[in-house]
């Protein structure tokens, strides 16, 4: 049985990956095309986790990112799991690919790459590296607040270049370090941040 099948079996019988009951987590098996339609038409008032095969997950992530602003608005994280379904390795990347048509134009949105770096640092932090954990929080916070403050590329209805966005993120991280900000407060989440960006972008267009 593959690992996705093992996860499905555990959820269906009410067992968590570590043997703990998960009866409080509703489970709704769904065909992938119905999942696409549901994401576009239904109102979600709680977090949704959709375990899929690789190809379906790739399509779903692109759809959801576009719904909240831009395919460059979040990172993609791949985890290698052991027999207990615990992560043993992590890889993060931008979900949009290399965008060769934008090469050399200094207009590509760097958010996904910046957040991918934050995700790798976060994984190292989970494994016990406190410096990586703090760096992850700082990078994620700087990236999302930069976009929320209006410094963003054309795909999010902004006028900033790639370099201008990156320079602003770096400046915010340096300012955070120089002021000794601990970074343990509430961070702006992807969904809240991108909803704000999308709303402002629609108003501007």
Image (cartoon, rainbow, N blue to C red):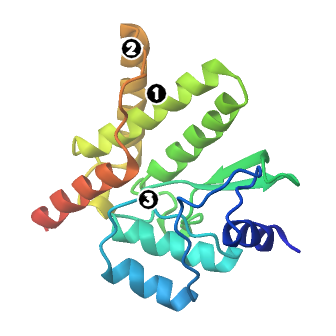
Question: Cβ–Cβ below 8 Å for labels 2 and 3?
Answer: no
Residue annotated with mark 1: 138
User: Are there few (<14), some (14-19), or many (20+) residues within 10 Å of tag 3?
Assistant: few
Between circles 2 and 3, the one closer to the viewer is: 3
Residue annotated with mark 2: 181
Say which label, 3 or 1, has the lower sequence index.
3
Image coordinates for residue 168, horizontal then vertical, percent? 35, 33
Disc 1 versus disc 2: distance between alpha carbons? 9 Å
Dot 3 falls on a residue whose secondary structure is loop
Q: Residue at x 40, y 83 (%)?
A: 38
Image coordinates for residue 139, horizontal then vertical, percent? 47, 32
User: Are there few (<14), some (14-19), or many (20+) residues within 10 Å of tag 2?
Assistant: few
Disc 2 versus disc 3: distance between alpha carbons? 29 Å
* Location of residue 55 by image quarter: bottom right
Q: Residue at x 62, y 19 (%)?
A: 131
Q: Which image quarter holds the C terminus?
A: bottom left
Q: Which image quarter holds the N terminus?
A: bottom right
Question: Cβ–Cβ below 8 Å for labels 1 and 2?
Answer: yes
* Location of residue 96 by image quarter: bottom right
Image coordinates for residue 185, horizontal then vertical, percent? 37, 25
């Amino acid at each position: 049985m593959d690992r996705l099948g093992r996860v499905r079996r555990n959820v269906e019988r009410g067992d968590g990956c570590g043997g703990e009951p998960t009866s409080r987590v509703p489970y709704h098996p769904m065909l992938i095309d119905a999942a696409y339609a549901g994401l576009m038409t239904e109102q979600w008032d709680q977090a949704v986790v959709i375990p899929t095969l690789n190809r379906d997950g790739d399509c779903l992530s692109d759809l959801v990112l576009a719904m909240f602003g831009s395919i460059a608005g979040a990172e993609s994280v791949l985890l290698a799991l052991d027999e207990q379904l615990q992560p043993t390795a992590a890889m993060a990347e931008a979900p949009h690919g290399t965008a060769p048509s934008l090469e050399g134009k200094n207009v590509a949105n760097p958010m996904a790459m910046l957040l991918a770096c934050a995700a790798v640092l976060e994984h190292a932090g989970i494994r016990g590296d406190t410096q990586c954990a703090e760096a992850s929080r700082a990078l994620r916070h700087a990236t999302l607040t930069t976009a929320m403050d209006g410094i963003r590329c054309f795909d999010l209805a902004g006028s900033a270049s790639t370099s201008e966005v990156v320079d602003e993120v770096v400046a915010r991280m340096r300012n955070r370090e120089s002021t000794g900000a601990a970074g343990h407060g509430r961070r702006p989440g992807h969904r809240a941040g991108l909803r704000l960006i999308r709303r402002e972008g629609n108003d501007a267009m």
